Image (spheres, rainbow, N blue to C red):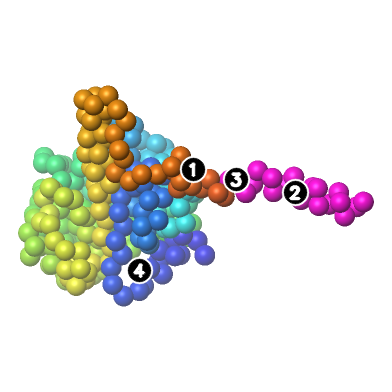
Amino acid sequence: MTQAARFRELMRRDGMVVAPGAYDCITARLIERAGFETVYMTGAGTAATLGYPDFGIVTMSEMVANAGRIAAAVGLPVIADADTGYGNELNLVRTVREYETAGVAGIHIEDQGFPKKCGHLDDKEIVPREDWLAKIRAAAQSRRSPDFMIIARTDSRAVAGFDEAIARANAAIAAGADMAFVEAPQTVEEVAAVPRLVNGPCLLNVVRGGKTPDLDLREAESMGYKLAIVPGLLIKNVVGICEKMLDELRTTHRHPAPVREMSVRETFQLWGADEWDALRTRFRDAADSRREAAE
């Protein structure tokens, strides 16, 4: 079973799947070890690893490369940010093929103008509805596997109002999208209304300090959401921990105690050391066995 098929199976189950955001293989492995069932590759986090803000500066190839590394590092379905699809319908066809080849389970495509910006920043611009729907159709019809998930993200709430956001979400579902992602509803009432008004599964983006009110994810599940992504959870905390450790090193001139003590060996085990160590002698052992049998 492919990871795309596994994700489809998760979506068929009752309840909501929570996908914390990974920006590299380390954070993806930690999400897997923590027991979550899906990894979300954050576009903002990916941009940050390259030294850029989430302003649409990172290219499709750079995004796909990171998605492919993350997908190869874990045994979980990976849902990835694909920004605006990086162009028109022709670009969307290639974007879908590249992400699908990289092994991810699905992508979301937004209706912002290019270059885009984080959905929880001000002064966003959106493209005409039909331009975006053409790209959704291109994405849905160009995937090689019907299991590959196309998630339609609309940023129109901040630009054209809540009613337009719902209209766009429903139009995208009708155009072939598998899930709707209404970015940044601004009140608890709007958050609750999205899955009630959209004719298909819905994604909730959980951004602490963003435009959407903070709520218990169990409440979001009861509202009817099928997927919640938490893109900034790890990267924001990593920044805070790094700043704390660096400040302590600078002021005390000693290696600070880590948040969790780990030996060097244990650290490498997090990234598959045991599996790789088993390969050191595996093939030589097989050759020795054949040699002994021949003698």
Label for residue 225? Answer: none
Residue at the spot of label 1: 265
Amino acid type, callout 4: Met
Q: Which residue is mark 4?
A: 11
Question: Of circles 1 and 2, which is in front?
Answer: 1
Tag 4 secondary structure: helix
Amino acid beneath label 2: Asp
Q: Earlier in the sequence, mark 3 or mark 1?
A: 1
Q: In the rendered image, is residue 194 in sight? A: no
> Outermost residue, right direction?
295
Residue 214 image offset from top left, x and y in percent: 12, 57
x, y percent for residue 109: 30, 50
Q: Dot 2 lies on which element?
A: helix
Q: Separation of disc 2 and disc 4 at Cα?
A: 44 Å
Q: What distance separates the C-alpha of mark 4 from that of mark 1?
A: 37 Å
Horizontal and vertical percent for residue 190?
10, 62
Badge 1 marks a residue whose secondary structure is helix
**Label whose residue precedes the other's in the sequence (4 or 1):** 4
The residue range painted magenta reads: 276-295
Residue at image position (47%, 56%) is 75
State the residue position of label 3: 277
How far is mark 4 from mark 3, CA to CA? 36 Å
> In the rendered picture of this protein, how many numbered marks are placed on residues?
4
- N-terminal label among 4 and 3: 4
Disc number for residue 285? 2
